[in-house]
């Protein structure tokens, strides 16, 4: 039995703790805040409740595997899980409405033909077929297995771009997502907006994101989008209960100040908390933002033992991934019949939105792409009322002065105006609202720039890969959205599974970290 300290009780920390405790280890979780869940937070007031992080789940197979491996029971016995259907409603700036079914490639194709004209569905299906090629090429090495010591094959985008013609044959640069939209989707505005929305949601610039980012809509449309009754926070609560069942010890309001190393061999030997306690351990696993972890908790290991050659993470402008701006709405009156769970109001000017997010001078764009979540869940509001949330991708926390008087509230007005201009009629029903900026994300999760946790992608010369789970120093691991295989509920669950496999059980047999996801 090894003594394991996990830093952070976010979803990756909870998932890792439950797996490792099931494997026979003695696990202690140190959490800086007073509760579990990390980015999967909850806001409650006057009988209304809201997820403050992700509101929907993709690839539920990851948490089904967790439920079975740590308790031999299906996930559906821990939480009430249901597919979201329709998967989404899209409102385009020209007035076009698109309703996409959940997990139905054929249904999506028909909906696209109806909204954007004959042939639109065929074009989109072909791009999704290429997305499947990316999925099959990267599923195991990028999602289910430890990051290879030499990730050379992941530096190249596996998207099967067609041969270039004319002078284009002389060009060596790989395809981008914007080029896929222009060449394979014919530059059709509706299809382009649909493809780019998936990139923007995760903080990727369509002009520089590799073509392989088409795997993001492919995964949603192939495996479906799911909702947990009571909100995604209910999933965090279920995994926390599983940890308690497996005798995991939690220390809340207990930030870790420093990782300790054995001076004899440089192995991680425990942690020192901000309160001055020293917790000895054979293994330390951090779910902190990896940049914050190396700068603050690891620092220069030579102060506690032999120094390791820990790679330096880029903290320049390229590391400042956009964040999320959210407005939580308590609405008077019941949810209108036929309301979609998720509605996407697309930007009035996509080029202006992209420039505001990724240009030389980041700024707020007044008529942005807005994701509106309106769950049909009576547990989230008083009878006869409705809870809703609006989310927009915005520049990182340090790119704007969010503390300037009126900045956040004025932008909340603009976001609400954008939603209502599309016909949602939310303002007239408003009881109250709560505004959340990237500063809230940074304060609650420790992410240096309050950034969107991005999934790792192949291509871009390896620039979109995340830190390997096994650190150079022995006995030290990293998990979570800033570690392999990246951000998102499914991926942080995979991160925990991969790392549990690297640590291994308290007995001799080692688990196979692969096989979490059924083939499409």
Image: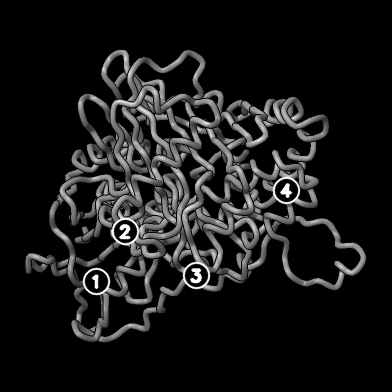
Q: Nearer the viewer, mark 3 or mark 2?
A: 3
Q: Is residue 307 above or below residue 50?
A: below
- Residue farthest to the left? 276
CB atoms of marks 3 and 2 within 8 Å: no
Secondary structure at badge 3 equals helix
Q: Is residue 370 above or below residue 483?
A: above
Q: What residue does disc 3 label?
A: 318
**Rendering quarter of residue 293:** bottom left
Question: In this view of the protein, which residue sits in the foreground, 319 or 126?
Answer: 319
Question: In this view of the protein, which residue sits in the foreground, 13 or 470?
Answer: 13
Secondary structure at badge 4 equals helix
**Rendering quarter of residue 333:** top left
Q: Position of residue 12 (x, y in %)?
A: 34, 51
**Rendering quarter of residue 326:** top left
Distance between the alpha carbons at the discs numbered 4 and 3: 28 Å
Q: What residue does disc 4 label?
A: 130
């Amino acid at each position: 039995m090894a003594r394991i300290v996990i830093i952070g009780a976010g979803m990756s920390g909870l998932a890792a703790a439950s797996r490792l405790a099931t494997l026979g280890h003695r696990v202690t979780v140190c959490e800086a805040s007073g509760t579990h869940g990390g980015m999967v937070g909850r806001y409650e007031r006057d009988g209304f409740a809201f997820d403050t992080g992700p509101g929907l789940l993709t690839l539920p197979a990851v948490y089904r595997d967790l439920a079975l491996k740590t308790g031999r029971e299906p996930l559906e016995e821990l939480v009430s899980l249901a597919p979201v259907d329709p998967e989404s409603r899209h409102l385009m700036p020209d007035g076009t409405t698109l309703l996409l079914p959940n997990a139905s490639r054929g249904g999506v194709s028909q909906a696209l033909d109806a909204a954007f004209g004959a042939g639109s569905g065929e074009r989109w299906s072909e791009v999704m077929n290429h997305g499947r090629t990316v999925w099959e090429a990267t599923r195991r090495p990028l999602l289910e297995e430890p990051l290879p010591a030499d990730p050379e094959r992941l530096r190249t985008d596996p998207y099967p771009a067609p041969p270039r013609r004319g002078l284009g044959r002389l060009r060596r640069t790989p395809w981008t997502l914007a080029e896929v939209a222009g060449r394979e989707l014919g530059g059709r505005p509706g299809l382009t907006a649909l493809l780019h929305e998936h990139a923007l949601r995760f903080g990727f610039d369509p002009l520089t994101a590799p073509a392989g980012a088409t795997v993001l809509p492919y995964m949603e449309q192939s495996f479906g989008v799911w909702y947990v009754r009571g909100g995604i926070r209910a999933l965090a609560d279920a995994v926390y209960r599983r940890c308690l069942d497996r005798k995991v010890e939690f220390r809340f309001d207990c930030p870790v100040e420093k990782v300790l190393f054995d001076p004899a061999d440089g192995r991680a030997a425990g942690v020192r908390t901000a309160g001055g306690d020293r917790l000895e351990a054979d293994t330390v696993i951090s779910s902190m933002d990896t940049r914050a972890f190396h700068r603050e908790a690891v620092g220069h290991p030579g102060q506690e033992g032999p120094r390791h050659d820990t790679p330096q993470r880029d903290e320049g402008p390229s590391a400042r991934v956009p964040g999320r701006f959210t407005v939580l709405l308590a609405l008077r009156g019941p949810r209108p019949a036929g309301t979609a769970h998720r509605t996407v109001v697309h930007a009035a000017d996509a080029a202006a939105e992209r420039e505001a997010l990724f240009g030389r001078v980041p700024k707020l764009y007044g008529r942005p792409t807005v994701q509106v979540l309106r769950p049909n869940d009576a547990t989230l509001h008083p009878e006869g009322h409705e809870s809703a949330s609006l989310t927009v991708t915005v520049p990182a926390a340090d790119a704007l002065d969010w503390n300037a008087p009126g900045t956040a509230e004025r932008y909340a007005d603009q976001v609400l105006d954008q939603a209502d201009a599309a016909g949602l009629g939310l303002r007239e029903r408003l009881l109250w609202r709560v505004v959340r900026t990237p500063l809230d994300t940074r304060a609650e999760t420790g992410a240096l720039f309050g950034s969107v946790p991005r999934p790792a992608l192949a291509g871009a010369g390896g620039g979109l890969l995340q830190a390997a789970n096994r650190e150079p120093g022995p006995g030290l691991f990293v998990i979570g959205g800033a570690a392999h295989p990246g951000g998102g509920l499914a991926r942080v669950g995979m991160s925990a599974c991969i790392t549990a496999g690297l640590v291994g059980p308290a007995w001799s047999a080692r688990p196979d970290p692969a096989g979490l996801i059924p083939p499409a």
